[in-house]
Amino acid sequence: MGLGPARDVSLADARALAHEARQAILGGRDPIAERRMAEKVESGPLTFGAAANALLEAKAPEWRNAKHAAQWRMTLTEYAKPLADMPVAAVDTEAVLSVLKPIWQTRH
């Protein structure tokens, strides 16, 4: 578990942080998972738009051509635009239907 760059963390601080991490482990907690959770809370909830962008980046190597990539990107960035700023946890059936109903008969 990293405690930070040596230039930013004094030896005394590093010892104290390491002691806290050991105490957490002895208490049955995972200090790395706790740090990641705290970072997520500080950065705010994951939005649909951020999740869509991450998906597009992750799937990019699977696409056979630029047209396929463009189709995916357009679908998630244009059709689902009303969902972009919503937290992923708030995207429910009604939110998805509000995006799909207007284009249901005109888009494949």
Image (spheres, rainbow, N blue to C red):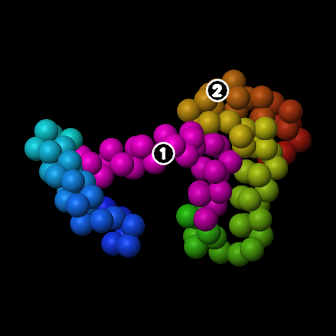
Give amino acid for label 2: Thr
- The residue identified by callout 1 is 40
Disc 1 to disc 2, C-alpha distance: 25 Å
Q: Give the answer, above or below, for where 32 lies relative to 29.
A: below
Instruction: Where is residue 95? Give x, y as percent.
Output: 70, 29
Region of the chain picked out in magenta, as a range? 30-57
In which quadrant will I find the N terminus?
Answer: bottom left
Q: Secondary structure at mark 2?
A: helix
- The residue identified by callout 2 is 93
Q: Who is closer to the viewer here, 50 or 74?
A: 50
- Overall secondary structure of the magenta stretch? helix
Q: Is residue 18 visible?
A: yes
Instruction: Where is residue 19? Give x, y as percent.
Output: 16, 52
Left or right of 71, for residue 47: left
Q: Who is closer to the viewer here, 36 or 54?
A: 36
Closer to the observer: label 1 or label 2?
1
Q: Is residue 37 magenta?
A: yes
